[in-house]
Structures are given as structure tokens and as C-alpha cells.
Amino acid sequence: MSGERCRSPWTIFPVVGEALNRFLLPADTGRVTRGLGLILALISLAVVAGLLAMQSKTAGPTAPAVTQAEQQALAVASTAAFQPVAQILAVDYAQAGTYVGAQLPLGSGVMLAQATSSSYCLQMIVNGSVVHESGPGGSPTAGPC
């Protein structure tokens, strides 16, 4: 067996081998159409970009659902900070009869932006956004007083 030569598979099936060899063409003999491939690649990129743009309206960082969730989170975070301060202001008002000159707890992050004899406006910054609460009995709202 070591003396036998390895035979080509086409010697076993000569008819198939002749049929295949008859249709062989040399590489790059005809006109190469690379331009069509480039155009198709650009079209597919444009389609993908269009689909991403359509999806970003419903799922991106500026989508209505995302901004609404951010506003709700902002309201919850500011309520947690404003509530204890509002209680302290209520105690100060009960003692002094006015909100003017009321002292807020240190380290609360809340600022008394406006104070009158019967109302006040608390203000703080939550994640870079200014939030305020007009009181007494108000709820957190985005923006300054």
C-alpha cells in the first residue's frame, strides 16, 4: 500500500471531472462589478440608520416614557428631602407665626428660597435639576421658585 499513488477522485468518476473542468473560467477575466456591492452596502446602512432613528423615538433617552419616568423619580427623590424640612417649618411657624427667618436643618440640601408670613418656597438640586416646593401643602415641581 505504501507503493500506491494517491489517485484523484476525478479518475474514479471521469465523467463528472470532465463536466466540471469544462465550465471553469479564469479569475477576473470579465468586468468586475464592485460598484454594485458598494451601492448595496450603502443602501443597507441607510436602512439600518432609519430603523435606529425610528426606534430612538420610543426607546431612547429622550423618549416620552423615559422622560416621564425621570420626572417621577425626581419627584419621589425631592419629596423625600422636602417632607422633613416642611415638618420643621411647620413647627417654626407654630412657634413664631411666620416663615420669615426660619432655620433649616444643616446638611439637608434644601434652601429656603422665599418666605413670607404665610407661605414659603423650598428649593434644591436633584441630579443637576432644580426642584421646588411651594408650601405649606405643596408638591415638588421642576424648576426654580
Image (cartoon, rainbow, N blue to C red):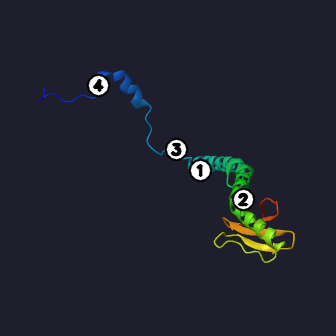
What secondary structure is found at the residue carrying circle 4? Answer: helix
Q: Amino acid at mark 1?
A: Leu
Relative depth, front residue between 40 and 66: 66
- Judge from the rendering whether residue 12 lies leftward or rightward of residue 51; answer left or right: left
Percent x, y for residue 99? 81, 72
- Please give the residue where the numbered disc 4 appears in the rendered image: 11
- Please give the residue where the numbered disc 3 appears in the rendered image: 30
Percent x, y for residue 45? 62, 50
Mark 4 or 2: in front is 2
Q: Please give the name of the residue rendered at 68% of the width and 55% of the height, measured from the top-left corner.
A: 61
- Please give the residue where the numbered disc 2 appears in the rendered image: 79
- Please give the residue where the numbered disc 1 appears in the rendered image: 38
- Report how far apart the C-alphas of labels 2 and 3 lie in the structure: 74 Å
Dot placed on the residue nearer the N-terminal end, 2 or 1: 1
What secondary structure is found at the residue carrying circle 3? Answer: loop
What secondary structure is found at the residue carrying circle 1? Answer: helix
Mark 1 or 4: in front is 1
